[in-house]
Amino acid sequence: MTASVNPKKLIKGGLHDWEVVIGMEIHAQVTSRSKLFSGASTEFGAEPNDHVSLVDAAMPGMLPVINEECVAQAVRTGLGLKAQINHRSVFDRKNYFYPDLPQGYQISQFKDPIVGEGTVLVDLVDGESITVGIERLHLEQDAGKSLHDQNPTQSFVDLNRSGVALMEIVSRPDLRSSEEARAYVTKLRTILRYLGTCDGDMEKGSLRADVNVSVRLPGDPLGTRCEIKNVNSIRFIGQAIEVEARRQIAIIEDGGTISQETRLFDPGKGETRSMRSKEEAHDYRYFPDPDLLPLEFDQAYVDRLAEGLPELPDAKKARFIADYGLSPYDAGVLIAERSSADYYEVVAKGRDGKAAANWVINELFGRLNKEGRDIESSPVSADQLGAVVDLIGEGVISGKIAKDLFEIVWTEGGDPRALVESRGLKQVTDTGAIETAIDAIIAQNPDKVSQAREKPTLLGWFVGQTMKATGGKANPAAVNALLKAKLGIE
Amino acid sequence: MSVDATTVRRIAHLARIAVSEDEVAPLQGELNAILAFVEQLGAVDVTGVEPMTSVTPMAMKKRTDTVTDGGHAADIVFNAPETEDNYFLVPKVVE
């Protein structure tokens, strides 16, 4: 919980500065081969109704049998959120009617979820950190998919997603700005991807957010909230919060009151609008599912799963700062994806950690972003990049030439060390050769030479000319020293 | 505990059961009779007794995470009144 109000995070209304209060329910698809209660595949993109068992279609007499891996994934996620793991939890029926919910109820967990309270540490851009409370995590079934644009009078229903396991992760209303909300979802996604419990692919709907937004004057009790359903990108989450907070502020400042309701964000129009038909459905009449026994396990089971967990983002970040001397910002960039962190560690092993970080973040990430590739498909391997860093460290090539070498390795591949030899990229440290080049430049530019004695900043021009004359291969330190001596500049 | 006429209409709507106006009063009577019958349980002292959701004295059976089902879309939609390309077709439900 943020203890005090940060004035920078307030939203200016016409009359007052308002504090926005945000809580989120994230639906994360559990990574598993088969569904939560049936043996049908969870794979994305199948033909309609191809990954459907009679259980998922809710045929009479079918009984759910729980997938043990989905349980393990929920426990791992709970451990990753530093949360209480409940050794006994219960599945309930959440009753509502919709064509893509053939059972007429969703099997979920209401009173006794598998995971209780936890926390997520969220780093913000300005270096500040906030702790966001997790209220609970529970397992539930996903619904099917309805297509409304295939036919003017009918909806098409595909049950492939019906019964796929979801983890609903409910946060406390601890977020105070759209930026904090975006950072929270980003961090949660990183944790889930590290754990391997959800792929976090928002385009495929593996991660979706219901966002609860309310506004209040700083110090006041919580305002009435509206829930924005099913926002499916981190950017839209930020936009939806900004739009909804301003809508509520305008209503209150005009003397109106907010009515608690479910709303939908329309990214095209940049507005939220009421989903009135959902209101009636809010009476879900939960009751324990008589088809399922309570879910029980012991601490030894939890301990076994805990032992198998990978190093988590916060621990990895702290280690990168301590072991490689990185800034918190650079460490944060590198650990955002496990694959990036692994790549970096190969480059940094036995080398200067900061130099390695600069090359990975600036050159490699820059280039990958430009071409829209991810690190798994990087044309430059970690070993190749490591060799480039070595060649600079050994003084074989200059930093400038190293960028050219990186470009060659990116486009043509090959061993950087061999390339330096075959392409003649070696830095010239032989002072004789550099001197010859400098003497020629001095001889051709007597006017500049006399000016340089008055105006030492002209040294830069001479350095440039010398580098040009040597094809960029002269050792910059040697060039500087020789030029200063020859021009008589201190 | 008892239900009034409004609650009867509401329950019927939530269950998507069509109930005509002249059925409300008789249903209200029936439901209240059932509730009164169940209410006898209130006489039992259950202090310290865990709520029982199942009478089976066993641990829940679990499945391994393997794909053992699916691949029969035509069977899944076989009983549907209307289908197209193995989709179920229903009256349009978008808002």
Image (cartoon, coloured by chain):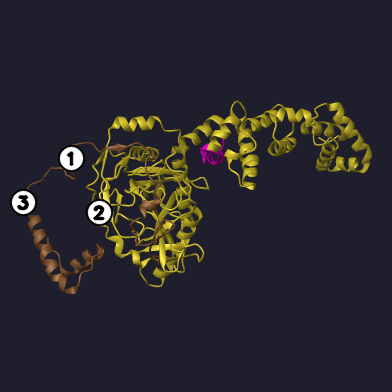
Q: Is residue B85 magenta?
A: no
Q: Earlier in the sequence, mark 1 or mark 3?
A: 3
Q: Residues within 10 Å of mark 3 (few under 14, many from 20)?
A: few
Residue A210 screen position, x and y as percent: 40, 55
Residue type at tag 3: Ala
Q: B31 or A441: nearer the eye? A: B31
* Residue at image mark 1: B56
Q: Main secondary structure of the magenta part?
A: helix
Give the CA separation, mark 3 to mark 2.
25 Å
Residue A78 screen position, x and y as percent: 36, 40
- Report if the CB atoms under discs 2 and 1 are less than 8 Å apart: no
Residue type at tag 1: Thr
**Figure label count:** 3
* Residue at image mark 2: A286
Query: Which chain is in yellow here?
Result: A
Q: Residues within 10 Å of mark 2 (few under 14, many from 20)?
A: some
Give the CA separation, mark 2 to mark 1.
21 Å
Q: Which mark is residue B43?
A: 3
Residue type at tag 2: Tyr
Which chain's residue wears label 2?
A
Which chain's residue wears label 1?
B
Residue A2 screen position, x and y as percent: 40, 49
- x 58%, y 42%: residue: A374
The range drawn in magenta is A326-338
- x 32%, y 55%: residue: A102
Element at label 3 = helix
Which of pointers 3 and 2 indicates the residue nearer the eye? Answer: 2
Element at label 2 = loop
Left or right: residue A33 compared with residue A473: left
Query: Which chain is in brown here?
Result: B
Q: Quadrant where the C terminus of chain A lies?
A: top right
